[in-house]
Amino acid sequence: MIILKTLLLLVFTITPSYADDVLSQIAVHLVKADITLGDFQQEKHLKVLRKPLLSTGTFIYHQQKGVIWQTLSPVPSLLLVNDTKLLTSEGELAVPAAFGQVFKAMLGGDFKQLAEGFSMAGGGQKSAWHLELIPNDALLKKLISAMVLAGDTELRSLEIQEAGGNTTRITFTHISHPTLLPPGQEANFERLSP
Amino acid sequence: MNVYHPKITAWVWLLGIVIIAALGSQALRSDWLETGFLALLPTSEQKPEVANAIKQHNEAMARKVIWLSGAGNAKAAIANARVLKRQLQDSGLFKRLDLEFSAQSYRDNYQQLFPYRYQLLDAQTKQALAKPQDLLSQNLAMLYSPLGQMQAAGLERDPLFVFSRYFNAQNSVKLAMEEGIVILRDGATFWALLLADLEDGSNKLDKLETLQALVDSAQKQAQTAGRELMVSGMALFTAAGSQSANREMSTVGLGSSIGILLLMLLTFRSPRPLLLSFLAIGCGMFSALVLSVLFFGKIHIITLVFGASLIGVADDYAVHFFCDSFGSKDWNPRQGLRYILPGLFIGLLTNLLSYAGLGFSPFPGLQEVAFFSAIGLLFAWLTVVMLFPVLLTGFKPEHEPKILKLTAYWQYHWPLWVFKWQPWLIAGMAVFIVGGIAQLTPRDDVRLLQSAPVDLVKTADKIKQLLPLSQDNQFFLVTGNGQNDWHDHEQQLLAQLASLKQQNALKYYQGISDYWPTEHSQQENYRLLKQIFYSSGLLQEYMAGLGFSKAAIGAELKQFVAAENLSLSLTSWLKSADETRQHLWLGCKDGHCLSRVSLTGIHDLPAIAQLQTLPGVSLVDPAQDISVLFERYRLRASYLLVGAYIVVFMGLGLRFGWRNGLAIISVPVLAALSALAMMGWFNQLFSLFNLFALLLVLGIGIDDAVFFFMAGNKRASTSLAVTLSALTTLLAFGLLAISSTQIVHAFGFTISVGILTALLCAPLIGFRGYKNYYDNQSNQ
């Protein structure tokens, strides 16, 4: 609790110019590419469960087209996201478009987009940085207290801290930047286009 | 005639008008004007529950005003919307303003329904229960998804996510929100949504003006600040309509008043005829209004509009009287009256006969028009006959107006020319009439009544596209004997609508049976959950697999057992629902239950209308219903119109002989046929309203013809009277032809053609006899 409080204090005392500074520093380090793909390991800690929910899968980020999030184990599922749509195997999900925008912006390191909805604070050196995002929207704040991104030249991990105490930590590995989409994925993005 | 004392009759008239004024001061104090279209339906056809449902729906729709405040980012849009909301609040026009949608009511709703979670299943979940393993893997997929925060948070209370599924199905339309405010995105523009409900659903004119002024000033403010604002609502359409009608009416009214004023003053060089004309018309209209309200309780606005057109006929009597003064050298009002009374009497009688026909129709609208018109004519006529002899004492124009010379010349030479070319003219007329009527196509669409400004329609369409929530005008009514029966019927309808929605026949529909299962199905739902999960061990296995503690599993089982006998009544469900949904339920009366199913974004109305074959289901389409009503009125009025012409012909035939009767009736018949033909040639709107115009043409045509028929050697002054009254009527109603509202335009057009034709035909009546007399005079 004390750590959280100091963290919050830190966030609120940070001046915007400093935050901008950190952002531009991080942005300089990040590899800029249209396509990013890799594996993910997700660890969800729910208060009511005695053990974390572990899952793994692959992701593909395309700057214009959106994100394909494919969970492979333990339960295979597919999530397609772009700025306006959110598709699951169940069909289109009735989730505000902002979710998709944030999700895509986080994976793509699009800080400009994130700055619209979150207060940001962070720090680090050339080799490693971290960035904390606090939602501005009062309603969203009731659900998510903070998100922490960390990485070097790539985004390496993402942690979502929920107001209720649950946390989700996603780590990314085997990140690469091909110039073309892997075969078959074009069709998945096609489903997102209106 | 010795019993006739002008002063006594004038006193009798005065007494009568005082009595009517006294009655009027009572009757007109109440709410006497009816504006609803349903009041025009024959009483037997109007099911009260349907009428109520439509009324309620229309009122709710009429109240809604949607405001969208736009800016380059959501923050600015929200800030602007907040300022706007304060302005609207200060105006006092609105009963309700929704900008922030509180999360509290959402949570309250969740908590109210949560105890019944084992009883409430949505249709999709119920289907999914057939394959419980699939449902469980869906749950896992949800939990493992990077976006499953909301669901995961509720895992403890609702481990199967059954209630969250039901609750999400209840709130299936989700809009992006920021700070509790709905934000719609359209390219680079963010729109903040502000929903307003007008205080007054009846759209009173002064309130509409205030609203319009408010919209205009808000729009101007937004413009100067470089922001955007979109406003839409039925009230704005009504406001625009009444504004343009007002503008037109005042232009037409001013133009025709000046015209009539000049015409009367130039002809008589005295204000007396003008003032007396207004008096006669005014007394006629006022008595008609008072007696109609006393007789019917309320009169419809349409009656008033078409009743007012009677001015054209009522004016004939007065003008005829004045013009007679030019007819002889030593004219006095008593003599004049003695001379014109037979003509006036026959004119009145034929007019009354033609309106009486309408009274025998089962349509309340036509009955009212008939009664109103008959009373109005009678009192205008009585004023002329009883009062004018006294008030015209000493009236004797010394001059010979230019127009009299003109009409005197015309009434002689025009018939000469016509009779010379008779065969050719008859052939030409026949081609013109047959050709025109062949092209006549009736159009009864009520939407033609309104001509909405283009930018209003554009805004409304844009908003509809951004916010696919606003209900369409059409809706379904579902009935049943008792709640279970009703529920079955509505569920059948909703199932069909679901598949139509998949085929894109509509965007969205809403019926409460999707949210509230009957008590019987609630028990069934509970039994299903028990059988599949709670007593089969599947739930324990699933929860243990996820990592729940034994205690948590035990608690869940205990809660399930404790909830066994719970049931949620419709009344309790309604209490938890929002206003829009509460309005869908119309209640049960004598075991007969009724609900509404709202429709949004209809693309394929015919496909939707086919669902009416389902039991207890009927589609209500107010605009279509009124169009159908107009069509039936039009057909009925056509028969009555033909009937009226026949009755008048019979009367004339009995009085003047069949040959003469035929000659007289041919004037209005030709006038009416020409009007119809012109409508055909010029592709004018032909609907019920043109028929009212034709009825008027009958009245005026008959007057013109009868006056000429009985004119004898006074044809010069008669032709002046006929021309003057035709010109005044043209000024009063013909000018309506310039209106941009199609229906008003069509009314003016019909009257203009009809009156002009009657004016051209009337001098042919009685001309041969006059010519013999005239020739003899010249020979001597």
Image (spheres, coloured by chain):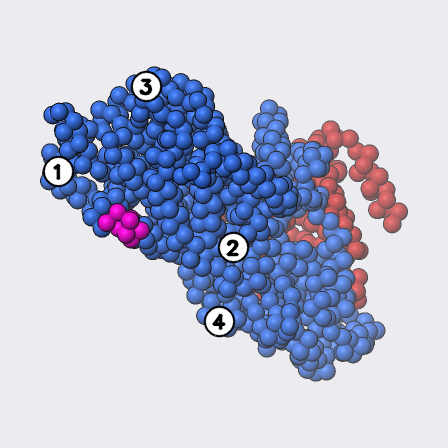
Chain colours: A red, B blue
* Residue B126 visible in the picture: no
Decide which of tag 1 and tag 4 comes sooner along the chain: 1
Please give the name of the residue rendered at 67% of the width and 43% of the height, measured from the top-left corner: B199
Q: In front of the other: label 3 or label 2?
A: 3
Decide which of tag 3 and tag 4 comes sooner along the chain: 3
Chain under callout 2: B
Kindly identify which numbered label has been placed on residue B38.
Answer: 2
Q: In front of the other: label 2 or label 4?
A: 2
Chain under callout 3: B
Decide which of tag 2 and tag 4 comes sooner along the chain: 2
Disc 3 from disc 2: Cα separation: 51 Å
Q: In front of the other: label 2 or label 1?
A: 1
Disc 3 from disc 4: Cα separation: 74 Å
Q: In front of the other: label 3 or label 4?
A: 3
Q: Which residue appears farthest toward the top when viewing the image?
A: B399
Chain under callout 1: B
Q: In front of the other: label 1 or label 3?
A: 3
Q: Quick check: do tags 1 and 4 share a chain?
A: yes
Question: For this view, does A43 lie left or right of residue B440?
Answer: right
In the rendered image, which quarter is residue B768 located in?
Answer: top left
Q: Mark 4 points at which residue?
A: B614
Please give the name of the residue rendered at 62% of the width and 37% of the height, measured from the top-left corner: B207
Decide which of tag 3 and tag 2 comes sooner along the chain: 2
Estimate how packed mark 4 is, as few (under 14), some (14 to 19) or many (20 or more) residues with alpha carbons within 10 Å.
some
Q: Name the residue under label 1.
A: B422
For numbered disc 4, what is the local secondary structure?
loop
Q: Nearer the viewer, residue B131 or B275?
A: B275
